[in-house]
Image (spheres, coloured by chain):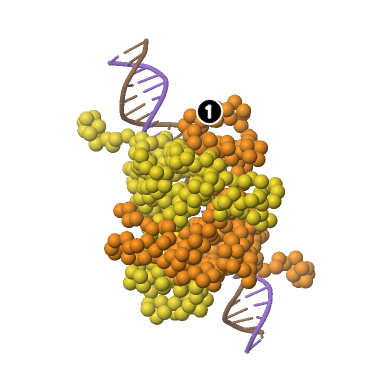
Chain colours: A yellow, B orange, C brown, D purple
Amino acid sequence: MTQQVEATRRVPLSRDRVLDAAVALADEVGIESLSMRRLAQELGVVPMALYKHVANKDELLDGMVDAIVREIDPPVRDAGWKCVVRLRVLSARRALLRHPWARRVLESRTNRTPAVLGYMDSFIGMFLAGGFSVDLTHHVMHALGSRMWGFTQELFDDPASGNPAAMAPEAQAAVFREMAERYPNILKVATAARHDDGSVAGQGCDDQFEFEFALDLLLDGFERLHEQGWTSQRANLVGGAPGDSGGPPKPRPESV
Amino acid sequence: MTQQVEATRRVPLSRDRVLDAAVALADEVGIESLSMRRLAQELGVVPMALYKHVANKDELLDGMVDAIVREIDPPVRDAGWKCVVRLRVLSARRALLRHPWARRVLESRTNRTPAVLGYMDSFIGMFLAGGFSVDLTHHVMHALGSRMWGFTQELFDDPASGNPAAMAPEAQAAVFREMAERYPNILKVATAARHDDGSVAGQGCDDQFEFEFALDLLLDGFERLHEQGWTSQRANLVGGAPGDSGGPPKPRPESV
DNA sequence: AGGGTAGGTGTACGCAGTACACTTGTCAAG
DNA sequence: CTTGACAAGTGTACTGCGTACACCTACCCT
């Protein structure tokens, strides 16, 4: 009988099991529905049991982020910095797209977890290995910002339609007319983006294309600065703008 | 006596009064401590009273965002697109910096409020007025992304120190040693960024500089594409990559 | 004078995170 | 074989949240 109980006995929880379950649950029901109680239930356990394996919910979220970040491929070897960086970012993008909630969580955290730091460190290393100065690398990392993770914020998601097709065509037309009047420019680019791929209701534009467009624009900018031997003339902080060292971005002090 | 009561009687709530109080409270105690209950208390009113003026908390947050967005200056007139865009973004940045919580709220919302749409519309208008094609404008807006609002995500905030100076120097040294071992590249750029302005404990780098650096890098990129008459050859979606129309960003289909 | 209505109130519900004291299962040492 | 320590899981309870719903009340218009 004892044996039977042991046979039925669940495998004990562990931090990894908790984290994996949390990731799976978030994938399934969305991050906003991920609660300690719900997760516990999923694991067939009482809520407080989780606290034996994670300190609190924040630490749980950190662990989830770390798990995703570890999915990102390591940098490819023996290639130019541009290619290495590009592929790495696109790998990150793939990982993040597998878990749509990851973007939000990553943004909400003041990321100091090991995997995140490790990723950033190796990211910096890619530029340094490519011959970038520490100075330029620093600014370039800032310029890349969260695009390092492979996401854009789609502030722009299909502005014309609330629920794509789930409203009466008359109401749809009314919304459309209203938009045309109030936000003519948005409408222009929205409709232009659309009849490229024919659909009105579907996804307005190709996110992957937009992402790579922006990424390449930045990388090309970095390349130009690097070739020119750009360096941040900190002089423009204390005095007049010196002879622009050839590079384009030369911030004029705008009196913030 | 009735008069006396009337004299003491509070001015009635209104949507604007609620919104203003919410903004002020968030400025003061942080967005995460802004609750309906707390806000009601601040206004000397019972929580449910607020619901006579805002539908729910989400709508409250939307209203708060709108209030901030309305603080952004209108575009300057009679200047080149680059200057107009630049100044507008920097104005947005100033507005957002006045309310540190605004970034997070703006990001968390699926922004469809009037002021936000209005801002985006006029933003698009600036490029179109500068002679950009609708097509290029579209991609450029994506590339700008949330930088349109004047913020970077400071994923990078001073990686070496938890609480700047609030820890024992020995512990500080230990952390430092640990960092040096595990994240040597982060350490390199962090320390380099630092001794420029002398302080070790303070803000590691000049956010405004970083922001303008990235912004100008993008704007210069836009300018180059515009001058070249760049256009997105959507052909690369259906067939082979056509003769690159001169512009740098030419996404290779990377098999996402 | 009367009644509709906008604005403010009170009570209550369900859900969240988690503190704290407890039982239970496992295994090593005596 | 007992014992007892320790890790893992439990139960109960607290506080705070957003908000539904029924109610009151003071004012304006007829």
Q: Nearest the camera: B212 or A78?
A: A78
Please state if B201 lies on the left or on the right of C19 as rendered. Answer: right
Vertical position of residue A61 compared to residue B2: above or below: above
- Res B188 seen here: yes
Point out residue A1 in the picture as x, y percentages from the top left corner.
Answer: 21, 31
Vertical position of residue B187 compared to residue B25: above or below: above
Q: Nearest the camera: B106 or A248?
A: A248
Residue pictured at 69% horizontal, 51% vertical: A240
Point out residue A232 in the picture as x, y percentages from the top left corner.
Answer: 59, 46
Q: Secondary structure beneath disc 1?
A: helix
Point out residue B150 in the picture as x, y percentages from the top left corner.
Answer: 57, 57
Query: Which residue matches tag 1?
Result: B177
Residue pictured at 35% horizontal, 50% vertical: A94
Q: Amino acid at mark 1?
A: Arg
Choose top left, top right, bottom left or bottom right for residue B98.
bottom right
Which chain is mark 1 on? B
Residue pictured at 56% horizontal, 51% vertical: A247
Please state if B180 lies on the left or on the right of A8 as rendered. Answer: right
Vertical position of residue B136 compared to residue A250: above or below: below
Please state if A100 lies on the left or on the right of B207 as rendered. Answer: left
Vertical position of residue A66 compared to residue A214: above or below: above
- Res B213 seen here: no
